[in-house]
Image (cartoon, rainbow, N blue to C red):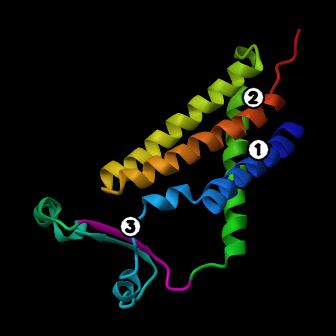
Amino acid sequence: MKKFVLAPSLAALAMFLWGFVYYGLSGIPYRTLEKASALPAFLAPLSADGAYLFPDPRDGAEAMAKASETGPVAMVHYRKVPRPMGETMALGYLHEFICCVLLAFVLMKCEPAFKGFSCRFMFAVAVGVLITFFSQGAEAIWWQQSWSWHLATMFYDVVAWAIAGAVLAKFFTPKLT
């Protein structure tokens, strides 16, 4: 029970605090953004919450290819009525907790192969790097999003996984026989 409730809870809390420091206090990733002063007027006509992609793949492959080559290219995620910050924070912690439970499960299954803390920790970091590079790299490549933004969030993600890995590796110590 301790391994699958307490350990992921503490690991998720550590990740959550790292997010507060990185995004909330340092503001480092926000330095990669362009000024968005024109966006409110541009977004006002949008009627529904959702993702908007230009060029639109539903316009056909030929139109998509032509627009992709000539530009502009844009993806907008829009919420007319945003969720309250408290709800966002709670969902963020829940997301991190579930990720830590899944990482704990993987560590448990591999426990006999890991002789020491550093092996468990480095495995958790490797898993985090793999997940981060796959997901953030895909966003930058396939959706043509800003590499500067994704590199800043990759740094956050890898450190978050390392923090979670350190906490979880402490709990998943193999029993000596």
Mark 1: which amino acid?
Ala
Q: Which residue is mark 1?
A: 11
Position of the C terminus by quadrant: top right
Question: Of marks 3 and 2, which one's residue comes earlier in the chain?
Answer: 3
Q: Which mark sits nearer the N-terminus, 1 or 3?
A: 1
The percent position of residue 159, horizontal first and vertical second, equals: 62, 41
* Residue 110 figure quarter: top right
Q: Residue at x 55, y 85 (%)?
A: 81
Which amino acid does the dot numbered 3 rest on?
Glu
Q: Which is more foreground, mark 2 or mark 1?
A: 1
Is 94 covered by the magenta stretch?
Answer: no
Please report whichever mark, 2 or 1, sits nearer to the chain's N-terminal start: 1
- Label 1 packing within 10 angstroms: few (<14), some (14-19), many (20+): many
Q: Nearer the viewer, mark 3 or mark 2?
A: 3
The amino acid beneath tag 2 is Met
Q: Which residue is mark 3?
A: 34
* Left or right, 39 with reference to 171: left
Q: Secondary structure at mark 1?
A: helix
Q: Are marks 2 and 1 in contact (CB under 8 Å)?
A: no
Is residue 109 toward the left or the right of residue 159 in the image? right
Q: Residue 74: x percent and y percent?
A: 29, 68
Q: Are marks 3 and 2 in contact (CB under 8 Å)?
A: no
**The magenta stretch spans which residues?**
73-81
Using the numbered discs, state the Cα–Cα distance from disc 1 to disc 3 in whole angstroms: 33 Å
User: Is residue 69 placed above or below 1 in the rendered structure?
Assistant: below
Image mark for residue 108: 2
Q: Residue at x 57, y 29 (%)?
A: 126
